[in-house]
Image (cartoon, helix red, strand yellow):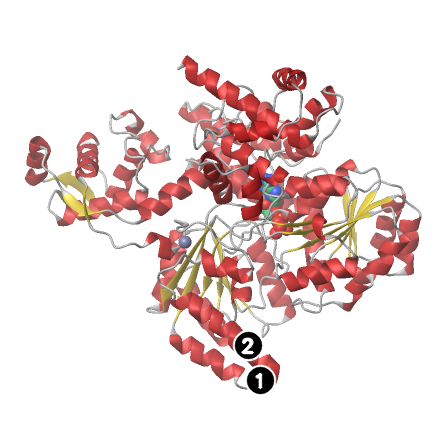
Amino acid sequence: MSSPASILKETFGYDTFRPLQNEVIENVLARKDSLAVMPTGGGKSLCYQIPSLLFEGLTVVVSPLIALMKDQVEQLRAYGVPSLFLNSTLSPQEYQENMEYVRNGEVKLLYVAPETLLTSRILALLDSIQLDCITIDEAHCISEWGHDFRPEYRQIVEVRKRFPNAVCLALTATATSRVRQDIRATLKFSTTNEFVASFNRENLYIEVLPKGDTFGQTIDLLDRYKDQSGIIYCFSRKQVDELASYLATKKYSVRPYHAGLDDSDRRKNQEAFIRDEVQIMVATIAFGMGINKPNVRFVMHFDLPKSIESYYQEIGRAGRDGLPAHCRLLYSYADVSKLNYFIDQKAGEEKRIAKQHLDAIVRYAEDERNCRRKPLLNYFGETYQADNCSYCDNCTSAPTPLADITIYAQKFLSCVKRADEKFGAGHIADILLGSKNEKVLRWEHNTLSTYGIGSELTKKQWMHIARQLLTMGYLKQEGEYHTLSLTVKALESLKKRETIFGVMQEAKRIQKKSKKKFEVEYNNAVFAILRQKRKEMADEEGVPPYVIFSDRTLIEMAAYYPQSSKSLLDIAGVGQAKLEKYGDVFLETIKAYCEKRGLHEIPHPQPTLAASPAPKGKGNTLSARGRIIGEAFNDGASVQELMQQYGIKTNTILDYLYKYLLAGNELRNNGDLQSLLSASPDQQQASFSAFDELSPTYLKPVFDKLNSELNYDELKVLRMMYLISHQNDNHNEE
Ligand code: ADP
Ligand code: ZN
């Protein structure tokens, strides 16, 4: 029997749901009309894709973004999901063929534009088959209050009447309550079936810099993300052209994009960006709608955007894959005057609203004290609870007093010595960090006693320490390779164990947190080889590289060196179909690399925690909210209180607590868990035995085993008590 969780793993290769995905999926499967509001990158697609595989009949997806349909269908096919689209880009013959496939029930998912859905031809087609779900993507198009109203969307209401047995799922990333209310009213949804995910995108580092040497500020960002994809937004076409040609002269891989270019150039440039042939897009806001590229590592605003809403939408294009991404806004008051000039050409209500929007973004940009996330989320009606997100400029730029850096200095200096004083700072830092890069392995520096002893700092911080040691005269640097060696002062200081004072770069906090949350140590050389392989395969199939595998998948491969089909399946994003299609090629590539260097497979951390809770930090997908809720619960807050405080349902609280527990934390206060139970002691005992036998990862089998006597909320509570009792066992053994 398939369940949403097993499809998530087997078809899509992911271990855990993103927030609210599971709730939405369960609701749709229970045939309740639902509205899901999630930020870009929140994972809306799986909310209908997984149910579509569990429904017997067809799921229709209505989307206004014709340009995206091909991309979505390509991605689904790579996962082995039979899907198609019908729109004006198809030839009459292709159109006919696709209709035939649908009629024969060979398709699970059908993407159509709203105007297509409304044609009598398509309605007749749908009449002839079993239609189980109508998904309305970009559902804000229903609302006149949204930024993208489409009258055809209103007529979907009539289509629903024609198919009363099909459940309806509306999806949007537009969170304003006005629009939500409009969607609900138009589609006659009830508020209890509305799911609003947090709009906080934890993996986005957000910063605002005062405009200075703008080209330098741009290059600085590009150099931090060498060979990676990014978008730079400019206000005017002229600015786009100027910056793009400047970057081209500096040999960056860059293309312009704006409405002044002719259609074919625009399409060519966009295509090159999507296919990883060009890394940087310099663009006006004309660029971005209908871009699904998951591995955009940075979004820079060269000029001030006109509102928080558009700013948020634009930075939202970064880091859809959940890996860290950087958002930099350059701000100067001159931009405000420029925008004001344009606003002054408007009149009446329009002018008033535009001014309001501008004011809000200016307040945001000029705030140098508060967490950037607060005003951003506040704008969407969400309160950001934490005082400090540690992932924006304001939260990480506390004044840095002089600190005792003796330990770091000692580590660095002795590593220079151990490596025979023949290397530069970057290589020394790599040794300290325990890097597995090619150069470290070639020189067998992984055998030095200083190898891997510096993982408490980032590379950037080690470089910063090195610069200070140079300035303070502990190190000298020579030759074209900037080789470091120790001075007499250093030798003496090491002998005397002198205290050394210096500045610790504030990056420490950011990096430490980001490392815990998202980063895996991986082998860059292997990553580069796998990327190359991916590009070749993508070109052969004529699809964008991310259709084959995402960056995250390649990063995990480059971290764990899987060498069998079984271990490849443990890698995020590898499901059954992709394993069959692409597995061999990647396995061979990894094996070849590893054999040459005597490297072995590294076990992938398992998300299943039958009896052993995960070590802290490993496989940790705990969100900030999850952590806050777990901590509040440990401090004595009851589930009831937490529900009220966060305005979320019992089962959501239970999910957060479960994740908190899975992330390796202890849950105290379990008297309150107990009070949620109505199960008899016998039933509790039976559930524990069922968890023993079936594993606590999935609840459905346990639910069945207990003859549906206990509901899912009860099972969730019991599962936590089960895990807690095992956690205690483990502690006792220690
Ligand atoms: P949205 O439509 O909300 O912008 P998508 O559905 O395109 O987001 O998902 C964004 C990315 O996140 C995709 O690359 C998708 O494969 C990935 N993703 C979605 N759900 C999960 C999950 N549960 N675990 C890991 N990755 C996921
Ligand atoms: Zn912050």
Q: Does residue 272 appear left or right of residue 11 in this picture? A: left
Inter-mark Cα distance, 2 to 1: 9 Å
Front position in the image: 21 or 179: 179
Q: Quadrant of the C terminus?
A: top left
Whether residues under marks 2 and 1 lie with C-beta atoms below 8 angstroms apart, the answer is yes
Residue in the picture at 39% in, 49% down: 390
The image shows residue 325, relative to residue 619, as above or below, that is below
Which residue was labeled with disc 2? 354
Q: Is residue 564 something that shows in the picture?
A: no
Residue in the picture at 34% in, 52% down: 396
Residue in the picture at 40% in, 69% down: 331
Residue 685 placement: quadrant: top right
Front position in the image: 685 or 519: 685
Q: Is residue 28 something that shows in the picture?
A: yes
Disc 2 is placed on an element classified as helix
Q: Quadrant of the N terminus?
A: top right
2 or 1: tag closer to the N-terminus: 1
Front position in the image: 446 or 656: 656
